[in-house]
Image: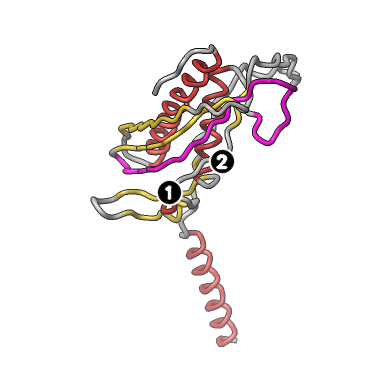
Amino acid sequence: MRDGSSATCATLLAAALMLTACGSVPQERFYSLSNGLGVGKPVPADGAARTTLAAPAYYIELPAVTVPKQVARNQLVVTTGASRIDVLEQERWSAPPAAEIGQALSLTITGELGTIDVFRNPVPDKAPVYRISTNVQRFESAPGQYALIDAVWSVRLAGNAQVLTCRSVAQESVGAGYDELVAGHRRAVTRIGADIAKAVRTLAAGEKPSC
């Protein structure tokens, strides 16, 4: 009986240790650049949206954004020194950074202009569509210091050979913590989106835009 009791105790102890080990595994946390952007008026209490937006005077088309290979992963990649970066396994983007930036830019630009992003969607015949290309050349994350996005972007009216190409560098100071870091990147994306929206608005007005 003693041997049986000892075996039972040993089994229970092993199970308890396994549960403790499982409970101590760090939990992954996910972040988004677009969450909360473009939020409009609240939906009525009955859950029915009663307003349909009128067709805009023009549309935008924002294809996939490109980002540097070293940050093209779901894990947050942070700068920890002059020549060192760390890949954080427990701190992750909810989608790859290119998709996060693209979605945030789309929401910012359409919100600024009151229009629709029609990428991969049909548009009314002869409707003006402004195509936006974005190449992020630097996407730097320094916790407690700064969040930086350096992007080259271009805008042109579909069917027109004239292209405006510009560069926007947005650097935001951030406090300690990854929530602050992500909030800094969100502000940076919003600033770049505002630059692009200004160029589209100027082109749509028939004026000559500038960077």
Give above or below for 19 relative to 198.
Answer: below
CA distance separating discs 1 and 2:
13 Å
Q: Position of residue 201 (x, y in %)?
A: 52, 16
Q: Looking at the image, which residue is at 44% across and 53% down?
A: 69
Q: Position of residue 189 (x, y in %)?
A: 44, 31
Q: What stretch is highlighted in magenta?
A: 118-144
Secondary structure at numbered mark 1: loop
* Residue type pointed to by label 2: Ala
Give the residue displayed 57% in from the left and 33% down from the top. Answer: 62
Depth check, front residue: 68 or 183: 68
Report the front residue among 27 and 104.
Answer: 104
Q: Is residue 184 magenta?
A: no
The residue under label 1 is which amino acid type? Pro
Report the residue marked by disc 1: 68
Horizontal side of 79 relative to 134 (left or right) equals: left
Residue 67 percent location from the top left of the image: 46, 45
Q: Where, by quadrant of the figure, is residue 121 drawn? A: top right
Residue depicted at x 75% and y 22%: 125
Category of crowding for the residue at label 2, using alpha-carbon neighbours closer than 10 angstroms: few (below 14), some (14–19), many (at least 20)? some
Q: Assign the C terminus to one quadrant of the image.
A: top left
The single residue placed furthest to the front in the displayed view is 161
Quadrant in which the N terminus is drawn? bottom right
Viewed as shown, does residue 71 lie left or right of 124?
left
Please, what secondary structure does the residue beneath circle 2 have? loop
What residue is pinned by disc 2? 64
Label 1 crowd (10 A; few <14 / some 14-19 / many >=20): some
